[in-house]
Amino acid sequence: MKLLVTGGAGFIGSAVVRLAVARGHAVVNLDALTYAACLENLAGVAESPLYAFEHADIRDRAALDRIFATHLPDAVMHLAAESHVDRSIDGPGDFIETNITGSYNLLEAARSYWVGRGRPEGFRFHHISTDEVFGSLPPQRSVKFSEATPYDPRSPYSASKAASDHLVRAWHHTYGLPVVLSNCSNNYGPYHFPEKLIPVIILGALAGRKLPVYGDGSHVRDWLYVEDHAEALMLVLEKGATGRSYNIGGNNECSNLELVRMLCAILDRKRPKEAGSYADQITFVPDRPGHDARYAIDSSRISAELGWRPSVTLAQGLERTVDWYLANEAWWRPLMARKGVGQRLGVGA
């Protein structure tokens, strides 16, 4: 199968590309190479005859048409998006243009290509989204997001992703485009861009900086190891029912404060300080505007229908992640100099 993966130089996208190539699929990586992209994520597959790169923006319809006509993909995996909530608060325009208008352009290019090829039955458009479109959950652990949960996005980022989800469903119901959708919980693992919480804590601890925890640290997230997510995404693409959506979660709920303390404890063992614990660097900072209290995914549909389950616990995944960052300073060090990385964003100013 030949896959067109948008956003393949990003965190989740590159995990998908690496897995797909390892399984023998041809992959075309379409990426605009914005600030959060890193082609070094793909160094292991860059020389493979199964891999091709197209430097293009999903907002450029002419480029999309050219790429479809040139590469003739059997399926699309759409991961290209602006994704950092804090940045969406400070500058929502890029999120509207890329996540909504860009997704529209990609849908239209895919529909034109699919129709032009005679509507092949095996074609799939897999739209990868987030659990943040569902809003915020109450504290009771028995309540989780299912595929039937009404949408209630609270940030410019989640609103833009909700809009793109609706567009994908509309193109399926109106035009018959064969689509599958997935909504995932918070990803983490190797190659996580260093503006996100887990790498912020790891790298901040090593640098002796204060470790920022928003509000009182009680916000709960369901953490999903990125390689488990990539496995699930390939399964949804290959075996998911057309028009169906699948929630993908790690079954690992944890408060932000608990998570930060877990990371500090791992670092205390692996790279101990001369005195004290990395937890001594934890600092509570003013909360993010509109910060959702809790996310948690009910993954029973993908488990029952497709047989997927996460392979690692949060403790195991964090251990692997810390090991990876300790061993790969040459990867993360240059990224720290990119615009906005290491700065407090999203304060609503």
Image (cartoon, rainbow, N blue to C red):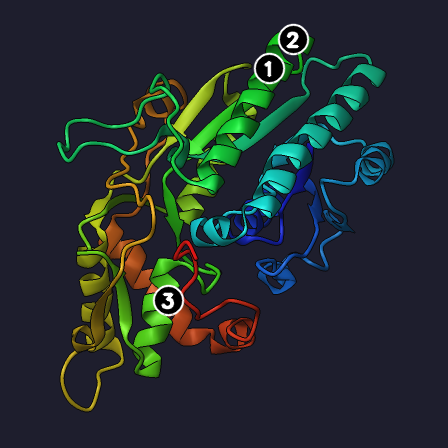
Q: Is residue 227 above or below residue 328?
A: above
Q: Residue at x 33, y 53 (%)?
A: 288
Q: Gap in Å between the C-alphas at discs 1 and 3?
A: 38 Å
Mark 2 or 3, nearer chain start: 2
Residue type marked 2: Thr
Q: In this view, does 6 lie above or below 259?
A: above
Residue type marked 3: Val
User: Which quadrant of the structure image shows residue 179?
Assistant: top right
Q: Gap in Å between the C-alphas at discs 2 and 3?
A: 43 Å
Q: Quadrant of the N terminus?
A: top right
Nearer to the camera, 62 or 113: 62
Residue at the disc numbered 3: 200
Residue at the disc numbered 1: 170
Q: Residues within 10 Å of mark 2 (few under 14, many from 20)?
A: few
User: Which quadrant of the structure image shows residue 261?
Assistant: bottom left
Q: In this view, does 336 lie above or below 165?
A: below
Mark 1 or 3, nearer chain start: 1
Residue at the disc numbered 2: 174
Q: Residue 72, percent across and down?
A: 81, 31
Q: Do the residues labelled 2 and 1 touch (CB within 8 Å)?
A: yes
Q: Residue 65, percent across and down?
A: 83, 33
Q: Which residue is drawn at 82% across and 38% down?
A: 67
Asked if residue 348 can be seen in this view, the reply is yes
Q: Which residue is drawn at 30% across and 27% down?
A: 145
In-image side of 118 versus 169 (left or right): right
